[in-house]
Image (cartoon, rainbow, N blue to C red):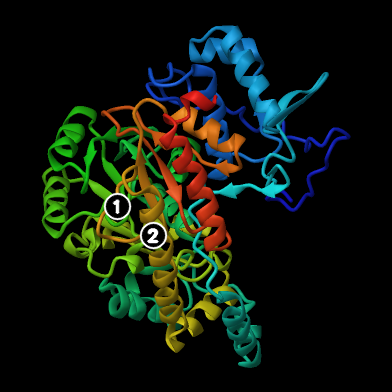
Amino acid sequence: MTEDGRTDSVTETGLPEASPAAPPWLPRLQGGGRSGGRPGRHGPAYLAIVEALAADLAAAAITPGTRILPQREMAERLGLSVGTVAKAYAEAARRGLIAGEVGRGTYVSATAAARPTVGGAAMVDMSLNTPPESGAGPLIAAAMAKVAASGEVATLLDYLPHAGVPAHRAAMAAWLAEDLGRPFPAAGIVLCNGAQHGIALALMAALAPGDTVLVEAVTYPGIAGIAARFGHRLHGVALDAEGLVPAALDEAFAATGARALYCMPTLQTPTGAVMSAARREAIVAVLRRHDAWAIEDDVYAFLAPAAGPALATLAPERVAYVGSLAKCLAPGLRVGVLAAPEALRGRVNTALRGTGWMASPLLTATAAHLLRSGGVRAQAARKRILAAERWRLAQNILGRHARFPGTIGFHLWLPTTGAAAEIVTAAAAQGVVLAPPLVIPGAPAPEGLRLCLGAPADLAEVRRGLGIVAAILDQGGGRALV
């Protein structure tokens, strides 16, 4: 269903009817932006296009029905030969990612998001950073029943304050302070439709179209979709084992004139880096030196209780804090939180009013009940246990191949040496879905792959997926298998 309530129709070949106004898809290739540039020197160019398409699908940056440019036009945009692009399209079609109709052109296939099988076994999806199943369903259902029986439903169905019902905001503020060590006044908290919505609201409040946003050199793919929609330019900043490098950030602000930074200080995606307390202080010092805003994505804070303070608690006057219940409870609840600097709160409310009026009060009431009753706390503890089980399994199987920092998360970083595209292709052929990281031009980026341990259904599926990846690495990183 479209945003205005219309149901998408599907053609006889399985392609959804695409909106003529929707922009065509263009790959983000290492060494160039969405509008062009050649891939990096590692891996065939045609595979870089295919893996960029698969990554955008995995990140929901594109959907079935999205138009793909004709081969010649794509080749011109990317500065590649038509033959290279034709090979990429053929491989994407072979994987079921795209399809075409005479007279309509080429589009992302209606079945592209379906879970394929290899040899009768379901693919092990290690490309999406979803939390492992921890029994949240019955807990949420019981909370919804309590809300329904509370006598509040009629009130919750009305137009309510944009930022959220005060009692719901207070419950969120108490949880942030008591469980995550992130003390924010309830008056400065806005409830939103997940972290992605919170990031968008912060960008809308802090920046104008065309402004540059600094991000880690490899980063969360969702930020690219938001930035493209708002006309923001992304510029990559170097990172090390602790995340953003302060000196590199300082240089990037000076060189670009950027007004804002987006970053993940805790369990950065895709690398899993965690900033020390000293590193966080250094990043805040750079922000103050350049009088810049920052958007702190802290959705994994519950997995790292020993991590340093939030940037937003160190510099509340310039850092917008984004959190969510998606990873510690359930993604489908769609309850996120944005704690904005006081100077931005009016503009945040304006942006919220223009992008949905308010988060669903029925859902925020359910979340508030779970926050007050300890249900969220219990689920977060359960998910930490499940993450540790999968982390130990990954250590046993991948040992010498991957980087295992002290902080356990849902994803780990697998360094590669020029073979990322081959590993992704070899893994797909054997039943494992991987996605290369989103590389943002502007700084040297670490080469590697993110392995998501939370998405597989159980430990057996995690073991199967990791075993396939380990075998590929043992045999030369996929080069002998492609």
Question: Which amino acid lies under the numbered mark 1 shown in the image of this protein?
Answer: Phe
Taking the image as shown, residue 205 lies to the left or right of residue 7, namely left
Q: Percent from the top left, x then y, of residue 239? A: 23, 40
Q: Percent from the top left, x then y, of residue 190? A: 41, 67
138 w.r.t. 20: above or below: below
> In the rendered view of the protein, which quadrant contains the C terminus?
top right
Q: CA distance from mark 2 to mark 1?
A: 9 Å
313 w.r.t. 380: above or below: above
Looking at the rendered structure, which numbered label has been put on residue 80? none
412 w.r.t. 138: above or below: above
Q: Percent from the top left, x then y, of residue 147? A: 60, 86
Q: Would residue 273 be seen by someone viewing this image from the given angle?
A: yes
Taking the image as shown, residue 473 lies to the left or right of residue 405, namely right
Asked whether the residues under the numbered discs 2 and 1 touch, taking CB atoms below 8 Å apart as contact, a structural biologist would say yes
The residue nearer to you, when weighing 22 against 157, is 22
The residue nearer to you, when weighing 435 against 247, is 435
Identified at 52% across, 75% down, the residue is: 364
Residue 70 placement: quadrant: top right
Q: Residue furthest right?
A: 12
Circle nearer the N terminus (2, 1): 2
Q: Which residue is mark 2?
A: 391
Identified at 22% across, 68% down, the residue is: 306
Identified at 54% across, 32% down, the residue is: 426
Secondary element under disc 1, as helix, strand or loop, is: loop
Instruction: Give the class, few, some or many, for how many residues have Cα within 10 Å of label 1's Cα (few <14, many ≥20).
Output: some
Looking at the rendered structure, which numbered label has been put on residue 404? 1
